[in-house]
Amino acid sequence: METKIATTFIKVAELGNITRAAEQLGYSQGAVTLQIKQLENEVGVPLFDRIGRRIKLTDAGERFREYAERLVQASKDAEAFAMDAMNPTGSLVIEANASVAIGLLPSMLPEFRRTYPGISLRVRITEDIDMIIDHIRQIRTEFAMIMGPLEDYEGCRLVAQRKEVFRFIATRDDPLAEKKNVSLSDVLDESFVPSFATDDKDMKVSYVEGPRLADLGYKITPMVEFGSCAGVANYLKGGSGRGYLPLYLIEDELRRGELCIIDTEDIGVHEHIQLICSSTRWISPQMKVFIEYVQSKLQASLSYPEKGHFVAY
């Protein structure tokens, strides 16, 4: 039975008059009469008794009315669901390490909120990526958004990613800022501020840049350390120090010439911004639009000044 015919049946039953029902539905009287006859043929019993110009539901019609109303309501519910998919509402929890939560999401999320005002967002910050991934597997949070090496996490799905460009960075007044072909040994003095993460189980400290520098024969003996690249970036923005950073954290400062890329060798750290969700959970409308939004933002090309140059653009 078509929803249109069920709607006609309900209106005729409500008004007890085919002519008035036709006027309210925008049909001709003949069209309404034909729909009622088609419906009675389909169900196999008379649904109306004709009494002069008025019609009245039969006992079978009274019982059938409940089914017709259910069908019409189901159709309305389906339409509402489709509208929700176009204008999603609800909430999303995003767990992120500090380099993403502090350095990237604050610049990305305002536009998303303007586009989807019905979706509320909660960002939780932790440097324990294993814990974040466990929360994804347990479906305690919708998304993990992290910066780190690409890994195939069991029970998880990588839905967006971008390889990040890391460079050695100096402040405007650093003596290395405008020099060419700077040696790494000159970069890695006490002015260098590394980022690190602590393994709470073993109390081991690992540096983002540490393994590659160790491979090259360099040992870091810093005077200042931070637990994330975002902390190092904010320290450099304060006007002193050097760091090894993903360029998205200092994009504005590079444009304004407040920070500079040191002209030295690239040590080849390969970290990625990654948006991860559970591989088993249903992707809700609000999750779908967030995935599409992050994909579009991460695919946007980034351009930066050359090493050793302050360039406004």
Image (cartoon, rainbow, N blue to C red):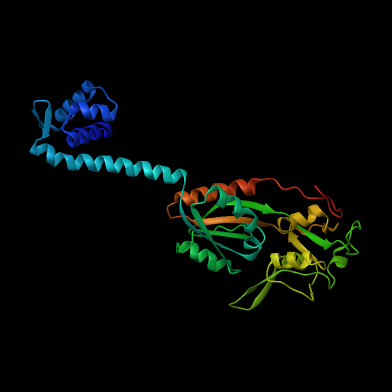
Q: Position of residue 273 (x, y in %)?
A: 63, 56
Is residue 93 something one can see in this rendering?
yes
Q: Residue at x 26, y 32 (%)?
A: 2
Q: Is residue 38 left or right of residue 140?
A: left
Q: Position of residue 189 (x, y in %)?
A: 85, 71
Q: Position of residue 276 (x, y in %)?
A: 54, 56
Residue 232 versus residue 244: which sits nearer the camera? Answer: 232
Quadrant in the rendering for residue 104? bottom right
User: Which quadrant of the rendered structure holds the N terminus?
Assistant: top left
Residue 37 versus residue 140: which sits nearer the camera? Answer: 37
Q: Is residue 289 left or right of residue 18?
A: right
Q: Is residue 300 above or below residue 37?
A: below
Q: Is residue 16 left or right of residue 135?
A: left
Q: Is residue 46 left or right of residue 162?
A: left
Q: Is residue 262 above or below residue 87?
A: below
Q: Residue at x 47, y 62 (%)?
A: 137
Q: Is residue 167 above or below residue 6?
A: below
Quadrant in the rendering for residue 38? top left
Q: Position of residue 265 (x, y in %)?
A: 83, 58
Is residue 1 something one can see in this rendering?
no
Residue 117 versus residue 173: which sits nearer the camera? Answer: 117
Q: Residue at x 37, y 44 (%)?
A: 80
